[in-house]
Image: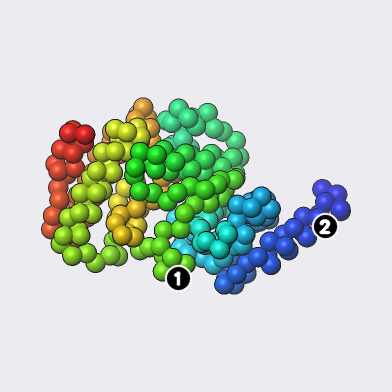
Amino acid sequence: MSKRSEEELDTRVDVLRTRLKDSEADKVEGSVFDRRTLMTLYDLASKGVIDALGGPISTGKEANLFYAIKDDVDVAIKVYRISTSNFQAMQDYLAGDPRFGRVRGTKRAIVAAWVKKEYRNLSRAEAVGVRVPHPIAMRDNILVMELIGERDHPAPQLKDVVLEEEDAKSTFDQLSEYISILYHDAGLVHADLSEYNVLYWEGPVIIDMGQSLTLDHPMARKFLERDIANIARFFQKKHGLGSEEEIKSRLRSH
């Protein structure tokens, strides 16, 4: 890279850093915001996808979630960490998906395919009426989407929500319906559905669909059974209601 290009790059990175709000730069950057990720964010900002980057919302196994601002509305930015993502697991999920089975190459290329897969799965789920974060944009290892909840009060995971019996029953029924709709109408299996991948904000919202599979994936049925078992187990243990058979019955009657 030429000296002039280096200087231009440093200037652009500095511009992006000035957009950071309500967060400590040393915590926001580090292993999450390497130079290329910062440049991707700068590109998203220059194209008007976001106006400013805000502070952290949560840290997952492979990605960090931040809030951002677009036209005075808060949105969420999911940044996959190139340095710590589980590439073998990603490749295993991608390999059986006819949409992405041929993806090979660098770690960054695999993560970019994963982000594209999550964006498409969210779009597909939303189109058939499953409540998920609305996907807004994607680029490399970054996914921009609707913020579920509010900046100072992000929606909690289902595991942390205290529900009255009636609300618990309606939430179980809604999730059972979502599993059925995903399967029959979207042709998808979530493949990691549990109380950890459901937010609660005036009802359940399904998240983290990067690993979600099309029905022609060889592991689709196995993962569907696991999703059903996870949801039934949670509601039985925490609320004393719901069963695998109830969810399967809804699937059969769809």
Q: Can residue 211 be seen in this view?
A: no
**Which residue is found at the position 18% from the left and 33% from the top?**
252
Circle 1: element type: loop
Q: Residues within 10 Å of mark 2 (few under 14, many from 20)?
A: few
Q: Which of marks 1 and 2 is in front?
A: 1
Picture mark count: 2
> Residue 7 has which mark?
2
Name the one closer to the observer, 74 or 175: 74
**Which residue is found at the position 18% from the left and 65% from the top?**
164
Q: Where is residue 42 in the image (x, y as percent from the top left)?
A: 67, 55
Q: Where is residue 40 in the image (x, y as percent from the top left)?
A: 65, 51
Name the one closer to the observer, 35 or 78: 78
Asked whether the residues under the numbered discs 1 and 2 touch, taking CB atoms below 8 Å apart as contact, a structural biologist would say no
**Lateral position of residue 88 relative to residue 250, left or right:** right
**Which residue is found at the position 48% from the left and 30% from the top?**
99
Check disc 1 and give the amino acid type. Answer: Asp
